[in-house]
Every structure is written in structure tokens, then in C-alpha cells.
Image (spheres, coloured by chain):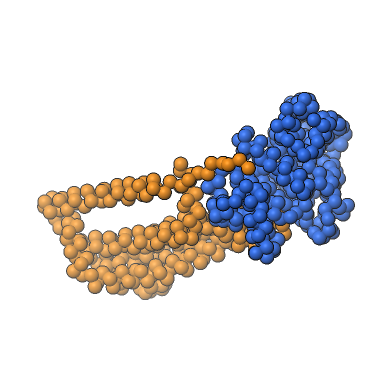
Amino acid sequence: MSRSSDRFETLALKGVGHQFRAGGELVPTIAGVDLEVGRSEFVTVVGPSGCGKSTLFNLAAGLLRPTAGQVKVNGEPLEGTNPYVAYMFQQAALLEWRDVLGNVVLGQEFLGMPKGEARAAAMEGLAEFGLSGFERRRAWELSGGMRQRVALLRTYLTQRELLLLDEPFGALDALTRLQMQQFLLDRWQRDQRTVIFITHDVDEALLLGDRVIVLAPRPTYVLATVEVGFERPRNAEEVLRAPEFTELKTQMLEMLVVDSESEVEPDGSANGSGPGRPAEAERSARQDAGSGE
Amino acid sequence: MVAEQVPRDGRTRGVRRGLAVAGIPLLVLVVFFAVWEFASKSGWQPDYILPAPSDVANDLWKDRGGYWDNAQTTLTEILIGFPIGLVLGLVIGGLIGMVASLRRTAYPFVVASQSLPTLALAPLLVLWFGFGVVPKVILVVQVVFFPITVATVAGLVSVPQQALVFGRTLGAGWWQLFVKIRVPASLPHVFSGLKIAASYAAVAAVIAEFAGAESGLGALMLRANDNLQTEAVFGALILITAIGVGFFALMSLLERLIVPWHEQYRKDGDR
């Protein structure tokens, strides 16, 4: 078992499958996923809604046990919760009874950090995240973008090295989302912590990630892995305007659309496709494209 | 960072709306009493059927010592029964809310306990426990604990799951999550249960007194009814209502003090 004082090096899902029991029946959510994420990688995950992306996160965090395969952290099988992980969600999940400062220090409180130290780090973070002067505000007084910044800061302040961001900008309007994407790109650049970022937005996946994992509908498996070569530090507007971007986007949309047409299974259990199907079905569409701007 | 609009709270508008909310019921009440007074004084109905509000007020003042003695009994029953029901409701609701298996096994029994007809239970309790305070307290406990149990369960079940997941990944223990997330998240629910319980408590005490009591507003009402002292029946009714409303107001006040975020959140949702 890896201790949290060690440095995070790799997260590996090896043939990971998951199913849950619903009324005596086993419902497969993840047919089989192989995935390796190394330190300082920014990996984005796209897939149709309800395909089991969040289950994948819970497996990586050690909150769920795989029913097949193995989750390994730094090469060791993961037991208990993953000591490197910090979460962030689509709904900021801010506590309404706490003000902004109180919400921001929540993670540090859970980690048992001394109050003064946590507060000092929080105040510094608030300034960096453009939230100075809002310490005493309540979540409902903030705009959607600010709420997500509070949640992102809370996650960053845990000092955890593997950030699991579950559609964090999914509920924002287009303009605010673009601002947040640029903000995250810039913030990532500073200490380059490992990020796995779930989204259903192809643009977002390509803009942010070094690598995009495309997932199949439920029960899910890795449909394709797309390498994204845009140079860092990235400027959102430049990337979005690059011809390579459009090319990659077209390819990915084709993949997603074709797949959802041929394999629509609303309850995920219709055609007897249990765990085991994935590997052979995986279109090994590893592509190198879009290098540079 | 690009500046973003922060919604301002509409406090002045809230005050004006508050006045409008309080003003209309007040007006209705004034008209109601005026019509009643007129109906009674005009000789449309005899005094023992419908005493005038002024006569009721006069009786309340004249016999204030007697009313107060009886009100004290009823208040005592509530003040003993309510906290017991509250603690019972929090504990049972807490257990049911936290333990999924109890939700299936124990919850039906809690619901069944509430299907007991309170009115029918009262004479039985008097038979068992006598004319004293005990059967009244039991009945108050029985009506108070249920809404609080249900509210506590609802509160604990509706806790923001993502905040719990966030905590769990950081190694937060059961107690930490309970104190920092579950309890504050369920408090607004608990308070809506408390308000319902507060308005039931006085009714339960009075019904228990009907079944047999030496003193109390319920006992006073029954005696006055037998003697055709209808103004005293109304006097007792008014005091019972006042106690119920008073308890409700007290809970609302506590709610504002203890869970202010909830009230404001709702206002924000209104706009």
C-alpha cells in the first residue's frame, strides 16, 4: 500500500470492470477499461452521458472496488482510498451553511491541517483565484463561474497530486466556461499536477487534454485514445482556431456518433454483452495528430 | 480574472413583502371579529350559543387567575412532552436515517405508531396512568416525535452526496462527515418537522385533557361547556390557539437563528 507521503507516479486501470446489483440482477457499468495515467499528465475523458464515467472515477479514488481487473497506484494494487486523489464535481457542492472561506478550507479541515495554516493558504489561494473580497459571501451570492472557482480552489488546496474533475464546467454558460477553461490551463501550468477531467464536450476535451480517452456507451470500454499535441502553455482561442483542432474534433464526433448509433442500449444490459467484450472491440485508433500551432 | 456580476439581496423589498404578508391576515381577522360582534350583539343568536368577542375578552380578563392556572397545567404538559418527543424523534430519525437496513425494518413501525388514533388512545392512557400529567405528556410525545423523526430521516437522506465523496477521498472519518456535513445539511429539514410538531403539541395536550383531567385548558373547556359558560369555552380556545401559535413562532425564530442560510436560500430561489 502506498503511503501519501510518497510521490504520486502512476495510476493504472488494468482490465477494470464493474457491475452493481440491482434487484438481484447484475448490471454491468464498466465492461473493461485499460488506462494508465502518469504524473503531470492532463487526461480528458469523453463519452456519452450515463456511460459510467463517474463510476470510473470512484474506482480510481478507491471508493468502489472493481468487480474485475485491478486498480494500481504507483505499481501497487490499490487498497482503501487512493491517497493522492482530490475530487471536484459539476455541481460545485458548496456547503450553504459556510461562507466562501469556510468552503475553501473544508478539504484542509478533513486532512487535519492546523486552522491557521489552512486559513493562510486559503487566503493566498482566494487571491490567486480572483476571489479576494468574497471570503464572507455565501455560495448562493456567487455566480456559477465563481462557485466553480471556489470548488476548484478547495480541490487544489488539498495539495493532492491527482485531481479528478468530474464535468466541472458542465453547467456553465459558454463564455464563462471558456474563461474557466483558460483559467484551469493557466493554473495547471504552474504546478502541473496530474488531472483526469471528465467531460461530454469534445471541444473541451481537446482543448484541455494531452490525451483524450473516448469511452463507449454503457457498459463502457475505451473506444479510442486520441493524442492531442498542442503545445503548452495553451491559449484557448488559438487552439480552438487551429485547423488541427477542427480535424481532431471531426474524427472524434464521427467516432462518438457512429458508436452511439450502432450500440444504443438504454439499460446497458440488453444484448448480453457482459464484461469481457471490450478488448477485442476496442478500435485501436491511437492517433498522433495536431502537433503544434 | 474577468469580473462577474454578484446578485445583491433585496432586503428592502423583503420588508415590504413581509408587511403585505402580515397585513392581509390582520385585516381579515379584524373584519371577522367585527361581524361576529355584530351578529352576537344584535340578538341574532343567544349568548350561550355565540357570545360576543367582547364578552369573551371580558371573561378572559375577569377570570385571568383561573385561566392562568389551567394554562400552566397545559403548558407544563407541553414543556415536558415536547423535549422528550424531540429527543426521541432525533434519535430514532437519526438511526433510521443513518442505517439503511433500519429504514426498511423499523420505519414501518414508526409510521404505524402514528396511525394510532390519538383521540381513541387518550381514554386508555387515562385509565392506565390516572388523571395526572402523565397521560397528557405521553400523548404530546406521541404526536411530537413523529414529524421530527420523518424530518430527520428526510434531512439525513438528502445530504449532498458529492460533499461526502469529497470528504471520503480525503480520509474524513464517519464522525467528521456527520458533524461537518450531515448534521448541518439536515437541520433545515429538522426545523420544518419542529414547526409541525409545535403546532400539534397543544392540540394533543388538550385532547388528552378531554379524556380526564383535574386542570388544564381542555378540562376548563369541558366544564364550561357543561355549564353553558360558552364565553369560557371560547376563552380557553383562544388560549390554546395562542399557545400553538406561540410555539410555532418560537420554532420559526429558532430556525432563523440557527439555520439562517436556509431562509435566505429560499428567498434567493423566489426571485
Total label count?
Answer: 0
Taking the spot 11% from the left edge, 52% from the top edge, the residue there is B43
Viewed as shown, does residue B65 lie left or right of A241?
Answer: left
Which quadrant of the structure image shows residue A279?
Answer: top right
- Toward the left, the furthest residue is B43
Taking the spot 21% from the left edge, 52% from the top edge, the residue there is B33
Q: Where is the N terminus of chain B found, in terms of image quarters?
A: top right
Q: Position of residue A24 (x, y in %)?
A: 72, 46
Taking the spot 50% from the left edge, 49% from the top edge, the residue there is B265
Q: What is the drawing colour of chain A?
A: blue
Is residue A93 in sight in this rendering?
Answer: no
Q: Position of residue B191 (x, y in %)?
A: 48, 58
Q: Position of residue A50 (x, y in %)?
A: 70, 38
Observer-nearest residue: B53 or A253? Answer: A253
**Which chain is assigned orange?**
B
User: Relative to A211, does residue A252 appear above or below in the rendering?
Assistant: above
